Image: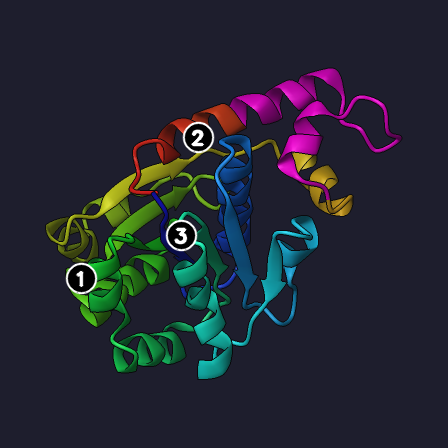
Amino acid sequence: MSSLNFIGGEKGGVGKSVTARLLAQYFIDRNRPFTGFDTDRSHNSFTRFYQGFASPVVVDSYEALDTVVNGFEGNPEHSVIVDLAAQTLAPLSKWIKESDLLPLFRELGVPVNFWHVLDDGRDSTDLLGTLVDTFGDKPNYIVVQNYGRGSDFALLLGSQSLSKAMLAGAKVIALPRLHEASMRKIDAQNTSFWKAANDRESPSALGLLERQRVKSWLATTYAAFDTLPL
């Protein structure tokens, strides 16, 4: 089974790229082939951390976006991860609607997943409602409460936005927080999460308990991912 995964949230700094990196590592650790695309022209963090798996793509070009899905014909077992930059919903939705992508992928039997990564602010919650209003009940919605970017999601849980998403069949998961110092070290070395959890030899290797915290963080995240239509 393959899937098409758009990792978004519209808002900057909510953890979209970290979520894309986690999903990439999940597929790698589960021996599931995938291709990644990075739409953030200012940071390209997905491409930087997972070289060989992800490449840049321009979200406001139909020709570029077509490359995201063209591979499903030749490699139907490959999944796709698209790390969306902030404020890309408008050009993306135009391409999806004018290409009639959602009915086509339903015929192909490939789930289309819109991941909405949130902090605990009102903007993130309101933008979830905008996403559901844009696509209705046609795709799958995965609502990600990122505890690395917030601690109290009561605003989301009591919102009309989440109610609309749940009526459309949304899945809600929690992304646990990784200790801030460990995440900074991983990011500074441009390393994969697998290497962060397992490297003992290099000068940049994390300490014993830091590696254990990364392993525990990945295990908890993977357990949540196991419940999703991936």
Badge nearest the viewer, 2 or 3: 2
In front here: 150 or 132? 132
Bin the neighbour count of mark 1 within 10 Å (Cα to Cα): few under 14, some 14-19, many 20 and up: some
Residue 120 in the image, given as x and y percentages of width and height? 38, 49
* Residues at discs 2 and 3 in contact (Cβ within 8 Å): no
Give percent across and percent down for residue 26.
50, 36
- Indicate whether 122 appears above or below 100: above
Instruction: First in sequence, mark 1 or 2: give its number.
Output: 1
Q: Is residue 26 left or right of residue 196?
A: left
Residue 32: give its label.
none
- Residue 79, position as x, y percentages in the image: 43, 50
Looking at the image, do the residues carrying marks 1 and 3 touch, with CB atoms under 8 Å apart? no
Q: Residue at x 27, y 49 (%)?
A: 155
Residue labelled with disc 1: 138
Per the image, label 2 sits on a secondary structure element best described as helix
Q: Earlier in the sequence, mark 2 or mark 3?
A: 3
Residue 111 spot, x, y in % from top left: 28, 52
**In this picture, which residue range is highlighted in magenta?**
191-217
> Real-space Cα distance between discs 1 and 3?
19 Å
Residue under label 2, please give it. 222
Q: Is residue 65 visible?
A: yes
Left or right placement of residue 172 versus residue 136 in this view = right
Residue designated by label 3: 117
Furthest-right residue in this view: 203
Q: Toward which corner of the image does residue 151 lie, by quadrant?
A: top left
Amino acid at circle 3: Val
Q: Coloring scheme of the render?
A: rainbow
In the image, what residue type sits under mark 1?
Lys
Circle 2 crowding by C-alpha within 10 Å: few under 14, some 14–19, many from 20: some
